[in-house]
Amino acid sequence: MHGWMFSSSLYDLLIIRGLFATVKMVNYEVIVYTSNLAGAPTMNKVFIKLVGTEGESKKQWLISLKGASDIIRGAAPGFSVCCPTSIGKLVLIELEKHRLPLLPEDSWFPAKVQVKSPEGDTYTFPIYRWITDSKVQRFREGTALTVLEDNHHLGRYSRQQELKLREEDYRWNVYAEGLPHSMKAESNLSLPCEVRFSFTKSTEFFYTASSGLTKLKLMGLTTCKKAWTNIDDISRVFCSKKTEISDYVKEHWTEDAFFGYQFLNGVNPMLIRRCEALPSNFPVPDEMVFLSGQCSLAHEIKNGNIFLCDYKQLNGLPTNTINGKKQYLTAPLVLLHKTPDDKMKPIAIQLKQTPADDNPVFLPTDSEYDWLMAKIFVRSADFNEHQMNVHLLRTHLLAEVFAVALLRNMPMVHPLYKLLVPHTRYTLQINHLARALLISENGVFTQFSASGGEGMLTLLKRSLSSVTYTSLCIPDDIAERGLENVPNFYYRDDGLKVWDIIHRFVQGIFGHYYKDDCAVEQDSELQKWISDIFEHGFLSKECTGIPQRLTTVAELVKFATMVIFTCSAQHSAVNTGQFDYGGWMPNCPISLQRPPPTKKGTASKATMLQTLPDVNTTVQGLSTLWLLSKQSSDFVAFGQYPEDHFCEEIPTKLIKDFQGDLEVLSAIIKNRNKGLEVPYTYMDPAEVENSVAI
Ligand code: FE2
């Protein structure tokens, strides 16, 4: 025992002083890259041990040539690790960080470590994690390996250890029965450090959240429980926060063509579908629609020119009480006609699901305010459907399921981890914040949206039962809704192109790592991942069509494409335009405070103003939409991977091709937008964020 200690100290001494003249040693050149993040460098002592197929180095203090422990921000200091003989092919490294006497323990965020062996091979070890304590941390060499190919016993051991720790750090939680499960965390600070917001992101988020409201508070608007008395006053409150599109919306919101356009290219392009037969609860006779008698409704349905938006999910939802007043939310049916000049125009609106004398079918030929009020009720229904179903559930909550399932089941060395982890950035924290600030007891939507409270949770549960695998895959979804030939449908045009580009990339990656379907079938980590998603995300409902197992490479490619698409382009399509389309409140009222009209000829400008939400409700809604539409300065654009998780030649080349394809698409979209009255930018890859981060 004593002798070992002596020889160990002597060995360290030899290394430190470089007295190797008489001992033949082999040399490993080590470069340590520390991230550029604030707080990333360490003043602590860092030790490294190299582990190879033929042996391992001794644990060595990475003392630099200058004699200081300068693992500084963004820097890549070089070190030397000596061994008596070659340790073979490198499998992993062990890192340890210890405080120096009199100095506090700090946190360190290494990016990666590169090691050049005496044989001349360069090995890269991706890290991209905070090291906060003095425990030994193991990091695998960057070559992606599925569990079947991970043959070295030390590799397999560290793989199991990593997953064991991750299962402790990332736990499922049931936020409410009937909703996808979420990440268990008491507060933002109890989230593991590597999934938390950066300092920049945190500061900006809370600044944007508070600055919008502070000004409005000073103006007394957040406490003003009065109705608007003049429609122009609505635009004055938020005059400093407008966009070119929100200005356009203010000018055009009452126009039928623009009302129809929003079902295609607004923030909720997910509801419209081709109408093959009128629903039995929507009695629209031919003569009510085409007064000229030139074409019949049946004929236009047959020609594929009639479309339907049915908000049946909202039927009978309990509504909120705001400022002591009961609120109203309808479950409308909207019939639209694709006109010969390629416009999508509403031709009939029924505000409630059951036909009755007090539930008239409103028509464009009704009085100005009868028709406008019917459209306002539709837009308010759309706000609630969009926020809860299309935005929160179908992007945020599912992205969280994909993230937690990945972090619990995939070791860093797995190709699926490397592929998907950049698309999980900030998702766990933004969702924690959404639960705390938007849908908690005191959340903005709970307090100020028509469905706030019990209705909101019921709507989320109903929405989950309507989510299908088909509806999450844009090519299948567009076909299922019969929207292949609708003109001027940019969500579809851009979305299909983005999907194709992702699909090609993912196919390249998995084609490289899985030699056949059998390799997919036998990948136990992959099967655990998909079955976790099925169980915790879709509550084991077979009718969703979500796979419970993956049996072919093609199935894996499609599912991973859907995950990336949902977390990036789809979220952008339903998130980024929230202020553009909702910044002019009458176009997207968060709630309405008068019942829907039960007969024609009663609506006026005055009843419209009394129906729109009160001043405080309006400003709370607008500040939230502003916050949720704001791009952060540490935004990572789609397909950019600042962390090099893949190190090998083939995946690196595939990433370059993927980025090239996205760049070309971005240029095509920008060029197309030049000719549009309202540009559609939400799926331009340069504008899309890599993950659900806001
Ligand atoms: Fe969002």
Image: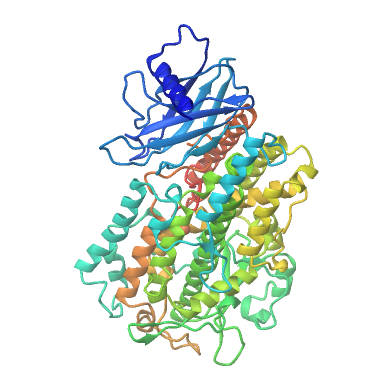
Instruction: Tell me what residue is drawn at x 58 percent, y 48 percent.
Output: 163
Query: Above or below — where is 64 with respect to 347?
Result: above
Is 341 left or right of 18, judged from the image as shown?
A: right
Q: Position of residue 345 (x, y in %)?
A: 57, 67
Out of 181 and 32, give the one closest to the viewer: 32
Q: Position of residue 273 (x, y in %)?
A: 65, 66
Q: Which of the 4 image quarters holds residue 583?
A: bottom left
Identity of the residue furthest to the front in this view: 2
Is 365 left or right of 542, judged from the image as shown?
A: left
Q: Which of the 4 image quarters holds residue 238?
A: bottom left
Identity of the residue furthest to the top in this view: 22
Q: Is residue 490 visible?
A: no
Query: Above or below — where is 441 with respect to 109?
Result: below
Q: Position of residue 301 (x, y in %)?
A: 71, 70
Instruction: Tell me what residue is drawn at x 25 percent, y 72 percent.
Output: 221
Q: Is residue 545 visible?
A: yes
Instruction: Tell me what residue is drawn at x 50 percent, y 79 percent.
Output: 455
Out of 688 and 51, give the one closest to the viewer: 51
The colouring scheme, among rainbow, by chain, secondary structure or one colour, is rainbow
Is 293 left or right of 682, judged from the image as shown?
A: right
- In what quadrant of the picture does the C terminus appear? bottom left
Identity of the residue furthest to the bottom in this view: 357
Q: Position of residue 214 (x, y in %)?
A: 24, 63
Query: Above or below — where is 80 with respect to 181?
Result: above
